[in-house]
Image (cartoon, rainbow, N blue to C red):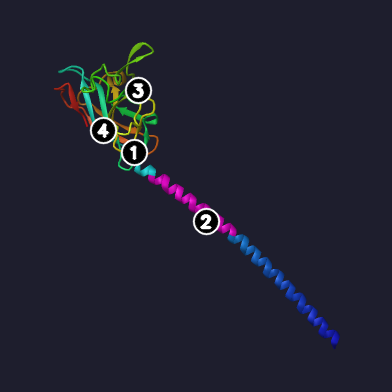
Amino acid sequence: MSGKRTLRKDNRAAIGIGTLIIFIAMVLVAAVAAGVLIQTSGFLQQKAASTGRESTEQVASGLAVAQVVGHIDSVPGGKVDLLAIYIEPNAGSSGIDLNTTVLTLNNESVEAQFKYNSSFFVDQADSGYDNIFNTSLAAWRANISGSITDLGSTDFGIIVLQDEDGSVTQNYPTLNKGDKVILTVNATAAFGGIEERTKVSGEVRPEFGAPGIIDFTTPPAYTDNVITLQ
């Protein structure tokens, strides 16, 4: 009888040890799983926050085209030879680098793309600034390596209108809150001039954010040397 009792006790002890081992193993597995879940949730939270910031910046950032003004080379019978595109950042926009901004214009015959050429830049202190279509301004005609050169068919220049913090510099033109500039385009070089009754569309697209939209039709007759197109 005593031998049977001892055997039962040994069996119970063995079962208890096995159960304890299984319990400890389950606790360890649960701890590892919990650690993995916590780490994963932390990573996903950081990723979501980063994506949210980037999405907000992408939506809020961008450019607005305030107006487009054209210069007529001769009245009557002339064409638009120069374009002045007034732009500013959207409300809440982060800084916009005009070095990486692309201007596109289409006159239904030619689609032209323009990028900033730092040789063609005018700040608020330059002489002749009171007339934006003064072709002696460096935004239209610049001295490059000792040679006077007109703004080309794939370049735009910059005339600074408002820049309180000095962020729009010649080599690093960055638009931020409150800044306003004019992008200058040589329409004669790009399109051979823009005639009457011509539809022109395009955009000013920054590297990040929404583009500024350009859309106008030139009038049926040019009666002034300077006209507002958009």
Q: Residue at x 35, y 27 (%)?
A: 169
User: Considering the numbered disc 4 on the image, is that residue within a helix, a strand or a loop?
Assistant: strand
Q: CA distance from mark 3 to mark 2?
A: 49 Å
Whole-Å distance between the Cαs marked 3 and 4?
20 Å
Q: Indicate which disc, 2 or 1, sits on the residue closer to the N terminus.
A: 2
**Residue denoted by label 3:** 155
Q: Which residue is mark 4?
A: 215
Residue 62, numbered circle:
1
Give the label, 3 or 2, closer to the camera: 2
* SS at circle 3: strand
Percent coordinates x, y for residue 53 in the rendering = 42, 47
Relative to 132, is 31 on the left or the right? right
Q: Closer to the observer: label 3 or label 4? A: 3
Lower sequence index among marks 3 and 4: 3
First of labels 1, 3 by sequence position: 1
Q: Earlier in the sequence, mark 4 or mark 2?
A: 2
User: Which is more toward the observer, 219 or 103?
Assistant: 103
Q: Kindly identify the amino acid type of the residue bearing the numbered disc 2.
A: Ser
Judging by the rendered image, the residue that carries numbered circle 2 is 41
**Highlighted magenta segment, given as a residue range:** 35-56
Where, quadrant-wise, is the C terminus in this rendering? Answer: top left
Q: Do the numbered discs 2 and 1 sit on residues whose CB atoms are within 8 Å?
A: no
Magenta-drawn stretch, dominant element (helix, strand or loop): helix
